[in-house]
Image: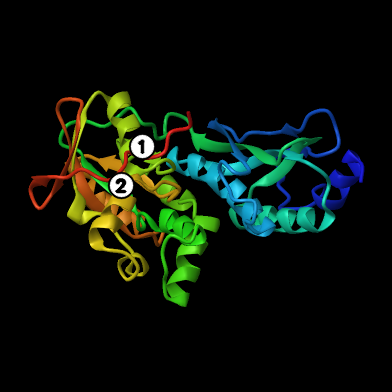
C-alpha cells in the first residue's frame, strides 16, 4: 500500500467535521479559522513502541490513547479541542492494524469533537506523534505558574490505576477478572478531563495533567510557581479495584509515582473553594483535596502526620 492510498483508505474524510476547518487533508497545509477572542493552545506528544506502549497493545486502544494523552494537555490548560495532525511511523503498512488503529483514534476524535486535518506517514520503528490544537478565551488559559501559599491542592478521579493496569499486563500481580478489566482499561483508555479543565477557568490558580506521576508533575507546578507543598498521602483517591488488588501502602506509592493517570492536579485559593464545588459539579468528575501550597520550594509528603517516602520518584523521559 502506498502512502497516499493509506491516508485515503484510513484517515481522509473521517472523523468529526468542523466549520472552522477551511481546508483539511489533501493539500500541503491545513487551513483553519480560529474563533474571535480565542487564543490557541498547541501540544504534541509521541508514543514509541517498547517505550510508551507494549507491542501487544490492541491497535484500537493505541489509537484512542494516542489522542487522549494529547487531549489531556489541552484539558490542563482549560482549552477546547479543535484540530489535530497525525504523524504515523510504521515498519510496514498492516491493513488490519491500520483499520483498527484509525477506528480507535477517530472514536476519541468524534467524542471530543476534534478534527483530523493533516499529518504524515513514513516507514520506520512504530511510533505515533499527534499535534493537537485547542482554543481558550484570551487571558483565561490555566498554567503551572500561578499557585500561591495557602492555595488548596486537588486532583480529579483516582490515582495509580493505569500503573497497576500496566503491571497486570506485565504479570506482576493477579486481580479478580472485573478488577483486571477495569485497571487495564484505565491504562489503555485514559479519560482526558476536557470539560473539567474548562470548568476550572477563572477558579484554579494553576493546573497540570498527571502524566509522569503525581510527585514528578506537582514538582513542575512548584518550580513554575516558586512555592512548596504539603500532600497528605492518606487523602489520595484510590479505586476499590486497586485496594482489592494490592496493599494500601503499595497503592499509595503507585498513586504518587505510577504515571499515566491523565487526571488533573490543580490549586485553588481559599476564596474560590465554594465556586469550585458549583463549577466542577457540571463536569460530573469527582475531585478531592490532597494538600496545600506553602512557602519554600519543597514537596513534603505526610502520612498520618509522619514523613512518607514512596518506593520510586516517578517517570523520567531521559
In the rendered view, would you say 240 is above or below 235? Answer: below
Residue 205: name its quadrant.
top left
Front-lying residue, 203 or 9: 9
**Protein image colouring:** rainbow
How far apart marks 1 and 2 lie (CA) works out to: 10 Å
Q: Tags 1 and 2 in contact by the CB under 8 Å rule? A: no
Could you say whether the residue bearing mark 2 is in a helix, strand or loop? helix
Q: Is residue 109 visible?
A: no
Closer to the camera: disc 1 or disc 2? 2
In the rendered view, would you say 76 is above or below 223? Answer: below
The residue where tag 2 is placed is: 256
Q: Is residue 17 left or right of residue 66?
A: right
Q: Residue at x 59, y 53 (%)?
A: 112
Q: Residue at x 68, y 34 (%)?
A: 33
Q: Residues within 10 Å of mark 2 (few under 14, many from 20)?
A: many
Q: Residue at x 30, y 47 (%)?
A: 256
Could you say where residue 181 lies in the image, as x and y percent from the top left? 50, 70
Could you say where residue 43 lies in the image, as x and y percent from the top left? 56, 33
View extreme (front): residue: 171
Q: Residues within 10 Å of mark 1 (few under 14, many from 20)?
A: many
Number of on-image labels: 2
Front-lying residue, 56 or 278: 56
Q: Residue at x 44, y 43 (%)?
A: 211
In the rendered view, would you say 272 is above or below 227? Answer: below
Could you say where residue 178 lies in the image, as x and y percent from the top left? 46, 76
Q: Is residue 262 left or right of residue 135?
A: left
Q: Earlier in the sequence, mark 1 or mark 2?
A: 1
Could you say whether the residue bearing mark 1 is in a helix, strand or loop? helix
Q: Is residue 10 left or right of residue 315?
A: right
The residue where tag 1 is placed is: 217
Amino acid at each position: 500500500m502506498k502512502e497516499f492510498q493509506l491516508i485515503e483508505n484510513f484517515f481522509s474524510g473521517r472523523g468529526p467535521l468542523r466549520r472552522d476547518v477551511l481546508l483539511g487533508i489533501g493539500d500541503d497545509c491545513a487551513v483553519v479559522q480560529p474563533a474571535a477572542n480565542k487564543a490557541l493552545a498547541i501540544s504534541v506528544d509521541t508514543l514509541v513502541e517498547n517505550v510508551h506502549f507494549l507491542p501487544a497493545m490492541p491497535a484500537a486502544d493505541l489509537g484512542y490513547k494516542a489522542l487522549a494523552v494529547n487531549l489531556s494537555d489541552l484539558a490542563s490548560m482549560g482549552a477546547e479541542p479543535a484540530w489535530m495532525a497525525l504523524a504515523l511511523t510504521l515498519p510496514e503498512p498492516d491493513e488490519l492494524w491500520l483499520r483498527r488503529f484509525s477506528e480507535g483514534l477517530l472514536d476519541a476524535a468524534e467524542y471530543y469533537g476534534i478534527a483530523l486535518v493533516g499529518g504524515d506517514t513514513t516507514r520506520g520503528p512504530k511510533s505515533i506523534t499527534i499535534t493537537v490544537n485547542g482554543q481558550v478565551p484570551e487571558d483565561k488559559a490555566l498554567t503551572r505558574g500561578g499557585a500561591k501559599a495557602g492555595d488548596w491542592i486537588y486532583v480529579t478521579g483516582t490515582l495509580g490505576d493505569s500503573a497497576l493496569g500496566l503491571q497486570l499486563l506485565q504479570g506482576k500481580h493477579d486481580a479478580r477478572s472485573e478488577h483486571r478489566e477495569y485497571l487495564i482499561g484505565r491504562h489503555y483508555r485514559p479519560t482526558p478531563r476536557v470539560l473539567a479543565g474548562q470548568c476550572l477557568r477563572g477558579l484554579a490558580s494553576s493546573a497540570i495533567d498527571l502524566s509522569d506521576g503525581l510527585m514528578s508533575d506537582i514538582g513542575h507546578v512548584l518550580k513554575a510557581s516558586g512555592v512548596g507543598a504539603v500532600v497528605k498521602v492518606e487523602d489520595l483517591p484510590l479505586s476499590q479495584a486497586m485496594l482489592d488488588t494490592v496493599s494500601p501502602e503499595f497503592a499509595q506509592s503507585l498513586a504518587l509515582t505510577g504515571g499515566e493517570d491523565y487526571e488533573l492536579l490543580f490549586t485553588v485559593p481559599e476564596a474560590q473553594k465554594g465556586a469550585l464545588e458549583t463549577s466542577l459539579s457540571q463536569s460530573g468528575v469527582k475531585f478531592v483535596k490532597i494538600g496545600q501550597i506553602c512557602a519554600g520550594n519543597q514537596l513534603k509528603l505526610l502520612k498520618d502526620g509522619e514523613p512518607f517516602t514512596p518506593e520510586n520518584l516517578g517517570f523520567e523521559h531521559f
